Image: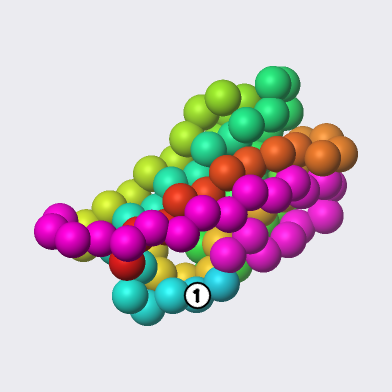
């Protein structure tokens, strides 16, 4: 992948969808790690996340994309409970 610069975002979401990161056309790497001990994150690129829809990121697991398969659209998250925490790394 060559030289790449990273940015990091930490946040939390409850049972209402939120945009975790905005669209970035130059994104080459994306990782979202669910840092909550028990709750699930439902996530979508370019659409509003909702319960039981989209990518499922279980407690302690991650969703990772890089290279030509890295989505550039905004990333929406929805938690299975209040204050579901996450950490995101983006590479450019």
Residue 34 lies in quadrant? top right
Residue sitting at x 86%, y 39%: 82
Segment colored magenta: 1-21
Residue sitting at x 76%, y 48%: 13
Number of other residues with Cα within 10 Å of mark 1, as a class: few under 14, some 14 to 19, many 20 or more: some
Q: In this view, does 31 lie to the left or right of 82?
A: left
Which residue is under mark 1? 23
Which coloring applies here?
rainbow
Q: In this view, does 1 lie to the left or right of 12?
A: left
Q: Is residue 81 above or below residue 28?
A: above
Query: How many numbered discs, if any?
Result: 1
What percent of the width, then of the height, locates residue 69?
A: 26, 58
* Foreground pick, 60 / 92: 92
Q: In this view, does 22 lie above or below 12?
A: below
Where, quadrant-wise, is the N terminus in this rendering? bottom left
**Outermost residue, left side:** 2
The answer to if 20 sits in the magenta stretch is: yes
Residue sitting at x 75%, y 58%: 17
Visible in this render: residue 29? yes
What percent of the width, then of the height, locates residue 77?
A: 66, 53
């Amino acid at each position: 992948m060559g030289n790449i610069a990273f940015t990091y975002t930490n946040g939390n979401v409850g049972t209402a969808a939120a945009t975790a990161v905005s669209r970035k056309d130059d994104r080459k790497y994306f990782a979202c790690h669910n840092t909550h001990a028990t709750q699930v994150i439902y996530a979508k690129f370019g659409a509003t996340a909702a319960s039981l829809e989209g990518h499922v990121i279980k407690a302690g697991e991650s969703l990772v994309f890089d290279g030509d398969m890295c989505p550039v659209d905004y990333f929406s998250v929805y938690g299975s409970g209040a204050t579901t925490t996450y950490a995101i790394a983006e590479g450019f």
